[in-house]
Amino acid sequence: MISMNLKHLRTKLSLTQEQFAEKFGVSRQTVAKWESGESLPDITKCAEVAYEYGLTLDELVMCPLEENKSDKKVDGEDKYVFGISKVGERGQVVIPKHARDVYSIKQGDRILVLGDNRGMAFIKMNSFPMIFDK
C-alpha cells in the first residue's frame, strides 16, 4: 500500500521522482524503489512524509489514498466505496480516513460488527445507543 500511496502523493503534486527525493533527502533511485515496492522507506522517512502531507502513519502505510478509490459515490446515492483495508495479525481493520470523516468516527468510538452470508458491516454504536449499552 505504501508504494502506491507514495507514488499517488508525488504525482498528485506534479513532482518528479527527483524533486520528491530532494524534498526528503534521498536519491531518485530510492524513490523509484519505494514506488515499485522493491524497498520500503524507514520509519523516520515515513514519519517525515506523513507529517509533510498531513497524514497519519496508518494512512500512509495502510490506507489507499487514491481519490478515485477512497471516496467514490455509488449510483449517486449516499453509498460509498472507500477502498480496501487489510486485516492485521490480531484482526484489526483500519477504516479509511474518508470513511471516518463521513461517519465522524474517532479513536475510542465503539463499532457494532454485523454480518451475513454476503459480507460484514460496521455501524457506529451511537446509531443504536439503547439496544446494546445495557
Image (cartoon, rainbow, N blue to C red):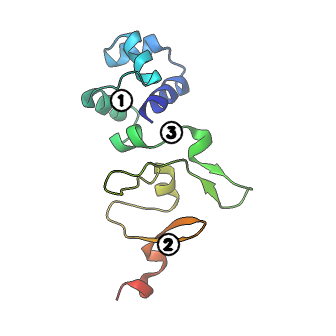
Q: Which residue is mark 1?
A: 49
* The N terminus, quarter of image: top left
The CA span between labels 2 and 3 is: 26 Å
Query: Can you give x and y, in whole percent of width and height, for residue 84 in the image?
Result: 52, 47
- SS of the residue under disc 1: helix
- Please, is residue 48 above or below residue 90 in the view? above
Residue extending farthest left: 44
Decide if residue 61 is on the left or right side of residue 4: left
Front in this rendered view, residue 18 or 63: 63
Of the residues shown, which amino acid type is indicated by label 1? Val
Residue extending farthest right: 75
Query: Can you give x and y, in whole percent of width and height, for residue 33 in the image?
Result: 41, 18
The CA span between labels 1 and 3 is: 13 Å
Residue placed at 43% from the left, 74% from the top? 125
Say whether marks 2 and 1 touch (CB < 8 Å): no
Decide if residue 119 is on the left or right side of residue 62: right
- SS of the residue under disc 2: strand
Of the residues shown, which amino acid type is indicated by label 2? Leu
Image disc number at residue 65: 3
Say whether marks 2 and 3 touch (CB < 8 Å): no
Of the residues shown, which amino acid type is indicated by label 3? Leu
* Category of crowding for the residue at label 3, using alpha-carbon neighbours closer than 10 angstroms: few (below 14), some (14–19), many (at least 20): many
Front in this rendered view, residue 118 or 33: 118
- Please, is residue 113 above or below residue 77 in the view? below
Say whether marks 1 and 3 touch (CB < 8 Å): no
